[in-house]
Image (tube, grey):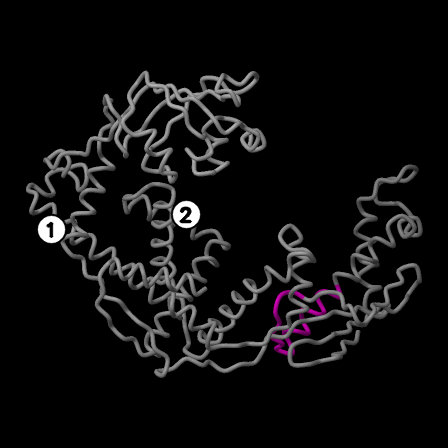
Amino acid sequence: MNIELQNQSDLSATILVKLGAEDYAPKVESQLKKIQKTANIKGFRVGHAPMGMLKRNYGKSVLVDEVNNMASQSLSDYLKDQNMDILAQPMPSVDVKSDLDFEKENADYTYAFDVALAPSFDLNINTKDEAMRYTIDVDDAEVKKEIENLRKRNGTMVAVDVSEENDIVYANATELDENGATFEGGLVDKPISFVAEMVKDDKTKKAVIGIKAGDVVKVNIFQLFNENITAINNTLGISKEEANDLNADFSLTITEVKRNEYAELNQAFFDTIFGPEQVKTEEEFEAKIRENLEIYFKSEAENQLEHMLNHLISEKHNIKLPDAFLKRWLIETKSEEYNADNIDERYSKEAEGLVYVLVQEKMAKEYNFEVGKEDLEQTSLGYVAQMFRQYGISNPEFSMIKEYSDKQLKDPNYIQTVMDIALRRKMIEKIKELVTIKEKKINVEDFYKEINAHKHEH
């Protein structure tokens, strides 16, 4: 066996793996003997079929499998022995042709593999780099707004006589022709609901405020739902194609109007929000709301800081990648996501993610990041709690989180996921030590203006 490195550059190389009969013949022979022990061939007792017959029946497939496996293992051993840091997996070379004529006996075989080499770079984050940590001021207006939101979410729907802007109006909708009569073959008495506040067209909004059960109102169905075809087809229970073909004019026969009556500020409401007897007065309730908001916005501010530090990683490390190889690799290994038509558009996100991983790996080596058992367990608990919240379990019990986390930590794939999260946390915490972090006090409205401005930039 001979392995040869060719066409090496800073970012790529071609590796030739050459196998002779003396390399693969013993393995092929051994595999055929294993087959012989269990082969059930007509005319012969099990285990007594002639080797010549086995070679004719199975020889080529065994040869191909053994030679392919040996070439793959030899390449893997070579990369490890040479300490070559590669990206993705090796692929058959596009420039150097492999010599694989399996019709010849005792032939020499040459596999040509292209590999992408990890780029060499220096970490470029230091105290000259600046980031902003916001301290968000939770004022009385923000507390009041949160209390109103909670009262609204915990309110009760009641029937009312005449609609106002925020009420839910229920109606039966009928499609009209150009003469204002019921459209033959069209939609008739389709139950719908809407809120006038959501209607953007002023004329349409005015028409659906101040109405009551029994009223009949003529509207443009497209303006009622703000030209949103998805909303129209979902509300009317028809396809998007049918929604696009609707006549614009509809008559609405109002069937009911409902209003959300906000929850009262009483003990039952306090218990619903915070649990039995946790707060007993409006003053205690407001103080608890303010405390929760301060915790929440402190977390939001820290998330924003870390988001900016993630951008800093990309901005400060203009790392050249073996783009052509990586695009080819993505197309060949993830064909359900990437193809020749979309690879250029989608590749930039993959490249950005790879740069992030490369910086993380380099920092892990340079600063000796270690993820121990305790790190894994703590990270897993946080990861599981977040996952539960995403599934609608807002306040999961710790015992439930712990039980699920312990179970998941027996899965190697899950462990790798949690390991990656823990390493990212260590990297971000280290970057916080390396850069200069400025502090700025800001109100809630201006904080979200900053976030939106940043989103607009990117």
Task: Tell me if mark 1 has few (under 14), some (14-19) or many (20+) residues whose alpha carbon lies within 10 angstroms of its own.
Answer: some
Instruction: Tell me which amino acid carries mark 1.
Output: Ala
Give the side of residue 447 with respect to residue 32, left or right.
left
Task: Tell me if mark 2 has few (under 14), some (14-19) or many (20+) residues whose alpha carbon lies within 10 angstroms of its own.
Answer: few
| Residue 143 in the image: above or below residue 166 | below
Residue 58 lies within the magenta run: no
Give the side of residue 334 with respect to residue 301, left or right.
right
| Residue 93 in the image: above or below residue 213 | below
* Residue 276 found in image quarter: top left
Who is closer to the viewer here, 140 or 6?
A: 140
Q: Residue at x 41, y 24 (%)?
A: 218
Who is closer to the viewer here, 57 or 289?
A: 289
Highlighted range, magenta: 70-89
Prevalent SS, magenta region: helix
Residue 71 lies within the magenta run: yes
Q: Residue at x 42, y 76 (%)?
A: 368
Name the residue carrying label 1. Answer: 287
- Residue 407 is labelled as 2
Q: Residue at x 22, y 29 (%)?
A: 156
From the image, which quarter does the C terminus lie in?
Answer: bottom left
